[in-house]
Image (spheres, grey):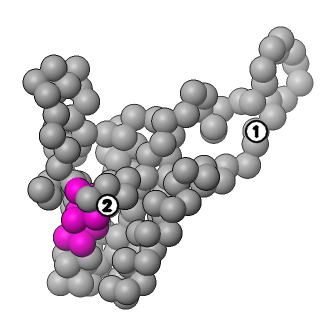
Amino acid sequence: MRTIVVGYDDSDASKRALDRAIEEAKGAGGRIFIVSVVELPLNPEGPQNYGTLDDSPAVSLPLVVPPELEPVKAHAEERLAAARVPAEFFWAAGDPAREIVDAARDNKASLVVLGEHHHSLLGRLFGTDVAATVEHELDAQVIVVE
């Protein structure tokens, strides 16, 4: 079974990427892992102590999908249910390229599908081109859908 990771943010480009991943999964009997990334001011997986640290154990809050990702998740699940392709939805906080690369490695993905986002030269120089970063860091096949 082929494992496919899709970076998904509910943009038109990511919808086309999800459609392409669905085609690939149907053709190869694959499974899709959808990764949505939200930027948060603090790492939700880290300690939740604010103020003076003492010897008491760090308090961790349970991780739930942030409210702004609920419609993103719902739209992706609707598309996948209609296509009858097995999939899981993951969300992460942080840099989208880093989180997609980590998800692909953690799930031993053989394919990553991303929607193309147009970036300025300055943006590419400062590393904001997610697709370029993912392609550079992974050994897996990367498809960028226009």
State the extent of the magenta-drawn residues as a range: 13-21
In this rendering, the answer to whether 2 lies above or below 45 is below
| Residue 131, image quadrant | top left
46 with respect to 2 (left or right) = right
State the SS at label 1: loop
- Label disc, if present, on residue 60 of the rendered structure: 1
Q: Is residue 16 magenta?
A: yes
Quadrant for the N terminus in the image: bottom left
Q: Quadrant of residue 138?
A: top left
Q: Which residue is mark 2?
A: 5
Asked if residue 98 shows in the view, the reply is yes
> What secondary structure is found at the residue carrying circle 2?
strand
**As shown in the figure, which amino acid type bears the numbered disc 1?**
Ser
Please provide percent x and percent y for residue 37: 44, 46
Residue at (61%, 52%) from the top-left corner? Answer: 67
Picture coordinates of residue 25 (x, y %)? Answer: 25, 78
Tell me: 111 left or right of 60.
left
Residue 78 location, quadrant: bottom left
Magenta region, mostly helix, strand or loop?
A: helix
Does residue 43 show up magenta in the picture? no
